[in-house]
Image (spheres, helix red, strand yellow):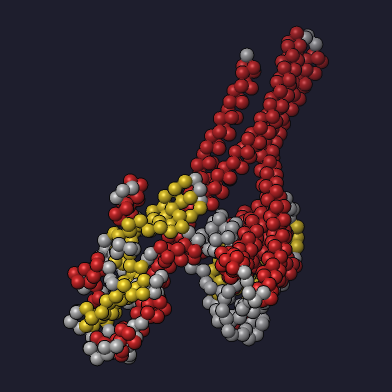
């Protein structure tokens, strides 16, 4: 009866265990993706605030040209009556992209104030609310320095306005101040549209009056009173970040909303589906194997019982008794071996299924990505040919029919000619991004396949440099990257060759990425002397190897790029952590390298800043323990 119930008990236990593993793993995994999404959304909101701050800095620079100017100084003294028509013209408003201007004399009397409609290019009266603000507040006397990050807003019916004022001085910045001059710029829909295009986010301003009619926004505004940035999912596909804008008196005036797609969250859901498939397949295989072993065990146990009964009936026959006892002992030994084989088989099946699943996913993704990447070049060539054909047609047809002119204006061929190459370039970057992720998945799934061999480390370094030769060459404004070698006398090293080469590939690729875009104007004197490298030198990578006294070898790979802050160094080897721009890094390279060096080779991998750049140190033993 108990044996009959065992399959049911085992099945329920197996299903319950798999279900519990899935629930716990899904919560942990999805929570991690949500945390990454929240951090990215907060960074997006900070980028938008930095853009607004940069806009205020640009407004400040324009204001400084007019505040420290003899013409403005004389106008404030009443000595230049034609200042408004001769020096503060409509072109000034358009060039500086300003909407509000006010000038006062040394006694705080308003000498001139005006608004400007940038769309219609005409001067308009100041809004009544702003006029009252000027009369009731010492707004023109609120001066800030250029290095102050604080944003100065005044809430107006049309939109919040950035306002900056400075004292009126002479050309050489001398006083006494003859009054104050103020410039203002609306943070309106046009400005938000500009920021949206730059940040690739959907931006909205929600005035405080509008928040009063929305319970959701009220809850967010309440949280913003304690938090600088609040992140709130809007739907399974969109997430929003919120921050509070305050006027120059510190009162809340509006909530800035930045909406982005939940790509990280969607990736988490895809990962959960793969996890469920993996657990289901592993559990099914494990159940079949254990069920087979259970049936074998039952048969062996039944046979042993039968033999024991026979021995009890034939106690008089010593030879038969010894034979059956030996058989029973043999069956017991077989049962123990089966139990050991059962445990090993379960572990092997789980790891094999996981490796096959990851490799299969990488293979299935790689095929369509290679198809897309291979056809983008042709699409770009065909597009350039069509654009060239349009140019030839426009040059040969001096006059176009009204219908053709209307169509040309409608599709905006100039915009298409400028934007289409950018669109194709974005598709290229996306395809390369997916290929990088697929390569990381393949490398991760092959960590246990290679065997330990004694190899020449220098040959591995040189083969890796050969693969990266194309990236070391001249690119755009960046000159060729010099590779400086200082190889020590090393014996053959026992290691996993392909995996250690992958470490070299990741470190050298990161060094090249760090040097991309660096601006250098000096030359390296002495190609074999690594001490002369510095931040101002031409881009260079150095590789040093040496043997230590305790049967250890050290490989140092460095570059003369920007140094890495200590807070970033502490997280360099975390999975999915990257300092590269979105779409340029997976965050897996250094994590996999750390696993290979530390866990597979019992070595060390760390990073440090040196006087002339950054250096990664790989330390592994000459001989691997069996």
Q: Position of residue 519 (x, y in %)?
A: 56, 79
- Left or right: where 61 falls relative to 482: left
- Estimate the x, y position of residue 437 in percent, counting from the top left: 63, 55
Task: Report if residue 464 is visible in the image.
Answer: no
Q: Is residue 565 visible?
A: yes
Along the horizontal axis of the image, is 81 left or right of 310?
A: left
Q: Quadrant of residue 229?
A: bottom left
Residue occupying the point 77% across, 22% down = 326
Which of the 4 image quarters holds residue 589?
A: bottom right
Residue 623 locus on image (x, y percent) = 70, 59
Q: Is residue 285 above or below residue 423?
A: above
165 lies left or right of 299: left
Q: Residue at x 70, y 30 (%)?
A: 289
Answer above or below: position of 122 versus 423.
below
Between 394 and 242, the one lying in front of the other is: 394
Q: Residue at x 62, y 84 (%)?
A: 524
The image shows a total of numbered marks equal to: 0
Along the viewing direction, whichever of 27 and 530 lies nearer the viewer: 27
240 to 411, vertically: above or below: above
Q: Nearer the viewer, residue 180 or 44?
A: 180
What is the quadrant of residue 127 in the picture? bottom left
Which quarter of the rendered picture does the N terminus lie within?
Answer: top right
Q: Position of residue 488 (x, y in %)?
A: 69, 73
Task: Pick the residue in front: 416 or 191.
Answer: 416
Q: Residue at x 29, y 59 (%)?
A: 252
**Relative side of 97 to 298, left or right:** left
């Amino acid at each position: 009866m108990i044996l009959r119930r065992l399959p049911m008990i085992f099945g329920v236990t197996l299903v319950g265990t798999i279900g519990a593993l899935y629930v716990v793993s899904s919560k942990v995994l999805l929570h991690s993706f949500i945390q990454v999404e929240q951090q990215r959304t907060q960074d997006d909101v900070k980028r938008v605030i930095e853009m607004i701050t940069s806009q205020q800095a640009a407004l400040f620079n324009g204001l400084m040209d007019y505040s420290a100017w003899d013409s403005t100084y004389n106008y404030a003294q009443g000595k230049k009556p034609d200042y408004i028509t001769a020096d503060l013209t409509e072109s000034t408003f358009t060039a500086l992209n300003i909407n509000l201007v006010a000038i006062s004399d040394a006694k705080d009397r308003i000498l001139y104030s005006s608004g400007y409609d940038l769309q219609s290019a005409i001067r308009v009266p100041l809004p009544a609310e702003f006029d009252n603000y000027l009369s009731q507040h010492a707004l023109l006397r609120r001066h800030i320095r250029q290095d102050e990050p604080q944003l100065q807003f005044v809430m107006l019916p049309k939109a919040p306005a950035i306002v900056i004022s400075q004292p009126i001085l002479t050309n050489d910045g001398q006083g006494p101040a003859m009054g104050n001059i103020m410039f203002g710029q609306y943070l309106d829909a046009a400005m938000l549209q500009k920021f949206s295009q730059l940040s690739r986010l959907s931006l909205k301003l929600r005035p405080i009056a509008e928040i009063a009619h929305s319970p959701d926004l009220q809850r967010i505004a309440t949280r913003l009173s304690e938090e600088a940035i609040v992140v709130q999912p809007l739907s399974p596909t969109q997430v929003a970040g919120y921050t509070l804008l305050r006027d120059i008196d510190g009162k809340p005036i509006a909530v800035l909303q930045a909406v982005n797609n939940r790509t990280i969250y969607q990736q988490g859901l895809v990962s959960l589906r793969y996890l469920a498939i993996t657990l289901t397949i592993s559990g099914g295989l494990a159940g079949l194997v254990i069920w087979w072993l259970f049936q074998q065990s039952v048969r062996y146990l039944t046979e042993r019982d039968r033999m024991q009964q026979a021995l009890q009936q034939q106690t008089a026959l010593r030879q038969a008794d010894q034979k059956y006892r030996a058989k029973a002992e043999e069956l017991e030994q077989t049962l123990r071996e089966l139990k050991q084989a059962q445990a090993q088989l379960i572990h092997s099946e789980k790891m094999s299924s996981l490796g096959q699943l990851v490799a299969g996913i990488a293979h299935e993704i790689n095929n369509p990505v290679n198809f897309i990447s291979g056809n983008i070049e042709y699409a770009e060539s065909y597009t350039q040919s069509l654009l060239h054909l349009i140019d030839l047609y426009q040059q040969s047809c001096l006059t176009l029919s009204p219908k053709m002119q209307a169509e040309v204006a409608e599709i905006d061929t100039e915009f298409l000619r400028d934007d289409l190459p950018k669109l194709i370039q974005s598709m290229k970057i996306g395809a390369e991004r997916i290929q990088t992720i697929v390569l990381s998945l393949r490398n991760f799934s092959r960590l246990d396949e290679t065997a330990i061999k004694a190899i020449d480390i220098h040959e591995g370094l040189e083969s890796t440099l050969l693969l990266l030769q194309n990236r070391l060459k001249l690119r755009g404004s960046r000159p060729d990257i010099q590779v400086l070698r200082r190889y020590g006398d090393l014996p053959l090293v026992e290691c996993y060759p392909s995996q250690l080469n992958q470490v070299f590939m990741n470190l050298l690729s990161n060094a090249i990425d760090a040097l991309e875009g660096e601006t250098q104007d000096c030359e390296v004197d002495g190609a074999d002397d690594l001490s002369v490298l510095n931040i101002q030198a031409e881009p260079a990578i150095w590789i040093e190897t040496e043997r230590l006294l305790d049967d250890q070898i050290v490989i140092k790979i460095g570059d003369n790029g920007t140094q890495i802050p200590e807070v970033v160094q502490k997280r360099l080897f975390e999975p999915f952590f990257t300092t590269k721009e979105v779409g340029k890094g997976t965050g897996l390279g250094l994590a996999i390298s750390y696993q290979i060096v530390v866990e597979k080779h019992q070595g060390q991998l760390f990073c440090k800043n040196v006087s002339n750049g950054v250096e990664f140190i790989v330390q592994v033993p000459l001989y691997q323990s069996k």
